[in-house]
Image: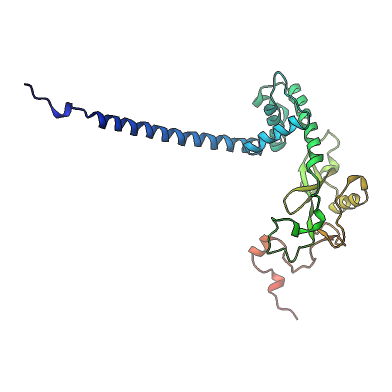
Amino acid sequence: MESSDSSDIVDPYTSYSSADEDEEELDEIQREQDEKDIKRKRDSCYENFRLRKSVFVDLSNDLTEKYGLKSTCGMSIHEMLGMFLMTCAHGAGNRLIQEIFQHSGETIHKHFHSILKAVCKLARDIIRPHQNYNDGAGAHKPCNGRYLPFFRDCIGSLDGTHVKSRLPQGQEISYIGRKGYPTQNILVGVDFNMCFTFAWVGWEGAAHDSRIFGKTLRRPKLNFPRPIGNKYYLVDAGYPHMKGYMAPYKEDNVRYHLTQFRRGATRQLREPKG
């Protein structure tokens, strides 16, 4: 009887176990790759459209179900919204959007304005104060308890923000302010839930914040959410300090911004008085 080499004998149990381990290892590698792909797609959505994927999908559904936006034979709602958000988020021009989405300039122009109309309808529903906004900061859970004793009657803050604008030739001058390029100066209100409660757009970049603020108070049609009783908004130094609106205390040796605190005491504070 011929003797057989032990190296030629294969244990079936060992073989099956090794195969299972290899399969599990491949599954683990695939899961890791899937997770990386999902993360990359999520990051890509945020980088391109400035919205998380879940928010992008929810916004698409809301515009379709509540505001009458409809897809066409050649374009889905997601693609329409993607073109709109990329234009707004990055200031991309029509030609760049043509190259990215492979549609004609006329098609892009048409669908951009379709989305814009739906978004304007959405804005009227969501840019508004909470029903109990005059209850003060105490009614809002996100308010930091560390500051609550000092800002219990505060209902939010008002400020102006400059957004870069593209205007017809010959109309840019009045929109060029301290930024050095055409902008719109937009007055916005924000509550302690970090939600916009008011917005007035369209002002020239050269317009001063106090002028826009004064016009806001004198126009009832704007439905500005005014403070009642002892409630008030926080405003910056560009606005008047008066009942209902608290501006910073104006003094040369007072620090307001975090950068000033990080640098330490100012020269005026370090100098001896008297």
Residue 166 in view of the camera: no
Q: Position of residue 82 (x, y in %)?
A: 68, 31
Check the image and name the residue furthest to the top: 73
Residue 16 in view of the camera: yes
* Residue situated in front as seen by the camera: 91 or 272: 91
Residue for point 39% across, 32% down = 26
Q: Quadrant of residue 52?
A: top right
Q: How many marks?
A: 0
Residue for point 46% across, 35% down = 31
Asked if residue 168 is positioned above or below residue 175 in the image, the reply reads above
Q: Quadrant of residue 250?
A: bottom right
* Residue situated in front as seen by the camera: 233 or 13: 13
- Tell me how the rendering is colored: rainbow
Image quarter hosting the N terminus: top left
Residue for point 72% across, 71% down = 268
Q: Position of residue 40 (x, y in %)?
A: 54, 36
Check the image and name the residue furthest to the front: 13
Check the image and name the residue furthest to the bottom: 274
* Residue situated in front as seen by the camera: 122 or 184: 122
Q: Position of residue 185 (x, y in %)?
A: 81, 46
Image quarter hosting the C terminus: bottom right
Residue for point 93% across, 48% down = 220
Q: Quadrant of residue 228?
A: bottom right
Q: Position of residue 143 (x, y in %)?
A: 70, 58
Check the image and name the residue furthest to the left: 1
Quick check: 3 left or right of 154? left
